Amino acid sequence: QVQLVESGGGLVQPGGSLRLSCAASGSIAAMGWYRQAPGKQRELVAGMTSGGSTVYADSVKGRFTISRDNAKNTVYLQMNTLKLEDTAVYYCNARFTTTWSRADLGSWGQGTQVTVSS
């Protein structure tokens, strides 16, 4: 199992920005970010392959940017223009396929809380 360590969460005002980081213990084909708010299902935020292909949830497209440093086995999520509805626990995910609709695959980070509040 790949170990994932997340960082970068915190409290931010609406319209603010945060950058999440996730370092993996080894190389992985696909890495991404999911989030889960209380009482809601886990949902995909963004995903990226080692080759550079990306996918975004419609709710974050244009505001969030996923990037990856393959040499460091690290994936990032730049979160701009944050909204109240972005409040959730964000989980890093690493998997060997790009079946992003499946929220039960691969290895998971410990989760980092992102709270957007005025």
Image: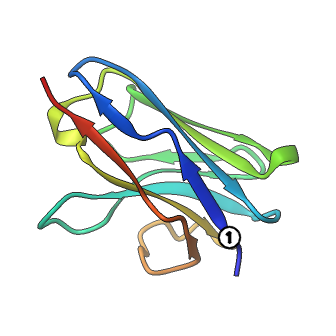
Where 55 falls versus 109 (above or below)?
Answer: above
Residue 60 in the figure: left or right of residue 104 = left
Residue 84 in the figure: left or right of residue 66 = left
Residue of label 1:
3
Where 44 falls versus 82 (above or below)?
Answer: below
Q: Quadrant of residue 83?
A: top left
Hey, which residue is sitting farthest top in the picture? 15
Residue 43 in the figure: left or right of residue 64 = left
**Number of marks in picture:** 1
Residue type indicated by callout 1: Gln
Where 41 falls versus 5 (above or below)?
Answer: below
Q: State the image coordinates of residue 7 (x, y, percent, origin top left).
A: 54, 45
Q: State the image coordinates of residue 35 (x, y, percent, origin top left).
A: 34, 56
Q: What secondary structure is marked by label 1?
A: loop
Q: State the image coordinates of residue 65 (x, y, percent, origin top left).
A: 51, 32
Callout 1 crowding tier (Cα within 10 Å): few <14, some 14–19, many ≥20: some
Residue ID at (32%, 19%): 16
Residue ID at (16%, 65%): 40
Residue 91 in the figure: left or right of residue 60 = right
The quarter of the picture where the N terminus appears is bottom right
Residue ID at (42%, 41%): 9
Where 58 falls versus 17 (above or below)?
Answer: below
Q: Nearer the viewer, residue 81 or 87?
A: 87
Q: Quadrant of residue 81?
A: top left
Q: State the image coordinates of residue 34 (x, y, percent, origin top left).
A: 41, 58
Q: Quadrant of residue 21?
A: top right
Residue ID at (49%, 65%): 110
The quarter of the picture where the C terminus appears is top left
